[in-house]
Amino acid sequence: MSLGGGQMQRSRGPTVHHHRQHSDNFIDSSSTDGAWLQGAQEVGTRLNRNLQRGVGREMYLDPSSPKIRSSSLRMMSGDDVFAGQFTSGLLDIHSFDTGLLSEMSVTSLYEKTAFQRHMRGKSYDDFEPYSSAEKIENKSRGPSENSLLKNLSSDKEKANNVAKIKVVVRKRPLNKKETMKKEEDIITIEHPSNSLTVHETKFKVDLTEYVEKHDFVFDAVLDEKVSNDEVYSETVQPIVPLIFQRTKATCFAYGQTGSGKTYTMQPLPLKASQDILSLMRYHYRNQGFQLYFSFFEIYGGKLYDLLSDRRKLCMREDGKQQVCIVGLQEYKVSDVEAIRELIEKGSSTRSTGTTGANEESSRSHAILQLVIKRSVDGSESKPARPVGKLSFIDLAGSERGADTTDNDKQTRMEGAEINKSLLALKECIRALDSDQGHIPFRGSKLTEVLRDSFVGDSRTVMISCISPGSGSCEHTLNTLRYADRVKSLSKGNTSKKEPAPSSSNLRESTTLPLASPVLQNQASFEDSLTDAYNGKNRFGWQKQREREATPPPSKVERVPSGREESKVVASVYTDYRESQLVSQEVGADENYDHYEEKYETPVRLAQPKDDKTRKPDTRGKGRNPQDTEIKHLNYDDELDALLKEEEDLVAAHRKQVEDTMEIVREEMNLLVVADKPGTKLNDYISRLNAVLEQKAASITQLQTRLAGFQKRLNDHNVLVSSTQ
Ligand SMILES: Nc1ncnc2c1ncn2[C@@H]1O[C@H](COP(=O)(O)OP(=O)(O)OP(=O)(O)O)[C@@H](O)[C@H]1O
């Protein structure tokens, strides 16, 4: 097997690691600041210092989150260090004035094919993604843009083949802590097949060490040498053009604390914004598209606006079951610089805490949304209505629920909430991918908020982040199993079972080809509408048109475009009272783009699991209670199966411990009898004790998880009985 990335080292020597990406607090422990905005965002951090000074001080004084430690504090404490220091990248940004550049026609862009090149391995520097991106935009024919336009030029048919769910795994390099602890890199990656193997060290009952291999296959597997730019071109870039065609796309990172979720997610929105703005500027020029930005977090089941002093938000459902986030500030943005500032501002306000694995660990799910709107007649003077949405979710660490070392009440509550939402998210994705009529979005706040991303023409990209160290083996396997389950039900593979661990069980890839999402060659927006009307859009375009007469959301802050003004805008905050009133109005008017047709869709008749060809009936309006019951039963069955699996796991572990203890007792008896000077009996006993402790710890963890499952099952039953 050719080893991509970190070769597993069975020797105990220092493990070689790659350190291609800039990270102050990675490997070099002298600095531990920065998570969401780390490394590549230093430039922005410096630029945004004034903004932080002006508005950041009260943000972390929220009494409802006593454990929250805002990174604003730390950033502000470093003012002296950064004052007046700008990198050349930043100066480069300012040396360009996009407004003065003449716009290049799409045709001429296509002619510049010599400039088109594949992003992988040749992308612009990770250290200054924003400045580089800005330069590319201004040059009008940089790789990012051309890559996008290339997508646009391909056959439209292929767009329909873009997988609804794409599961990508990213492995980070060993960090300094792991290296110091002499942890081995236990992940090997094989590139052409996108397969990955976890080498888990285990002990037989006679305490002989052996390695168990767990093989997985995903849509893409990215090793520690892959840059953030490459991550972007592999994950989000292909779906950017689709959001101009009424697609709701969601990209989220999943994985244990410290595995690189924030590091991975943080640059993506900005890169996506860059591409969106380029498309608006060149491909959809003068078609009235506008880009809106919002950023909030879900912490302990509550919503907070990260761009508005962590103001508490409420989620309400209107009469048509549309979710409105009351009070959420949306910013109209028209240049990358403004977006960067907003990202920085929101990130510095996010709830973080310190864990053993990560100095600045995210305690919340952060949701950053880019909404494309379009004014009714294509002119910017008229109110805009939402067209498509791209949501980025940086999830809290996946292992929080099983975190037994940090088990104060608040952490346990955080863990319970996080577990609940992760399970609910998985259920929604699975339902979504198997075209089920019923999407269980009520399972958690997270999925409720993302409700409109789970209906209609949606796309989901899941980036599973894993730590390579042997000390994280169990969490890594959990992450990969979660990812595997999300993927395994997609496109004809209904197996829920994870592969039996062995060295030769590499499964066939369940993935679809990584087709570029494609739009019609130089298609106009009107062309897209025609396609939607012809049945490609499950929302029903007719209704959409009727609703277009509805006034637009008045909660949107009108942001003047241009670099100078954008800074002002980023720090403008409307009066709380006013925004509440306006937001409530918005909710009442239901003037957000509604896709109520989908929500009113009757739950379809349960179909045989192997019948993949039948499509759900999304046209009728009637609701058959019997069908609903069947659906709920199916959902119950799934949860029961999950629970059963978990119980079996616990039982298996318990049995293993009992067997081991039995053997230990027998062995000890023999050894005690045979003990003579030099038999190293004590060594032997302490090794046995270590094994027992390890087993006991994993049983405790499993029991905690089991309790979580049971609670969710109860919640679920309550929910089912209340909806019946
Ligand atoms: N691919 C990578 N290359 C270099 N450094 C990385 C990479 N991934 C993560 N890191 C570093 O690892 C540390 C932890 O990463 P990060 O904060 O993104 O983890 P996380 O999964 O978001 O954790 P949490 O769930 O606790 O918030 C950071 O210092 C980050 O710079």
Image: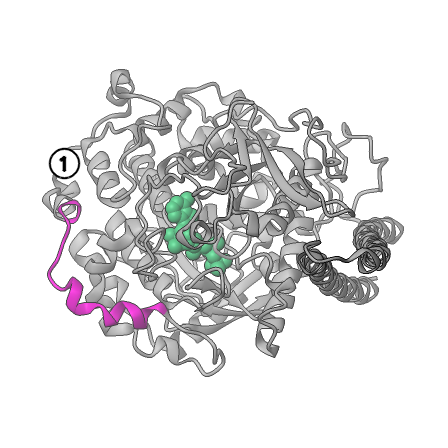
Q: What residue type is labelled 1?
A: Leu
SS at mark 1? loop
Q: In which quarter of the image is residue 227?
A: top left
Percent x, y of residue 226: 40, 35
Q: Name the residue under label 1.
A: 101
Can residue 718 be seen in the rendering of this structure? yes
Q: Is mark 1 within 8 Å of ligand 1?
A: no
Query: Is-magenta flag for residue 353?
Result: no
The quarter of the image holding the N terminus is: top right
* Most common secondary structure along the magenta stretch: helix
Q: Is residue 666 left or right of residue 197?
A: right
Q: Quadrant of residue 495?
A: top right
Query: Which of 555 and 273 lies nearest the eye of the viewer?
Result: 273
Q: In this view, does 396 lie to the left or right of 208?
A: left
Percent x, y of residue 466: 53, 46
Mark 1 is surrounded, within 10 Å at the Cα level, by few (under 14), some (14 to 19) or many (20 or more) other residues, namely few
Q: Residue at x 60, y 42 (%)?
A: 456
Q: Which residue is drawn at 49% across and 51% down?
A: 259
Q: Is residue 499 left or right of residue 406?
A: right
Tell me the magenta residue range: 71-90
Can residue 372 be seen in the rendering of this structure? no
Percent x, y of residue 492: 73, 29
Query: Is-magenta flag for residue 73?
Result: yes
Q: Is residue 15 left or right of residue 558?
A: right
Query: Which of 273 and 625 lies nearest the eye of the viewer?
Result: 273
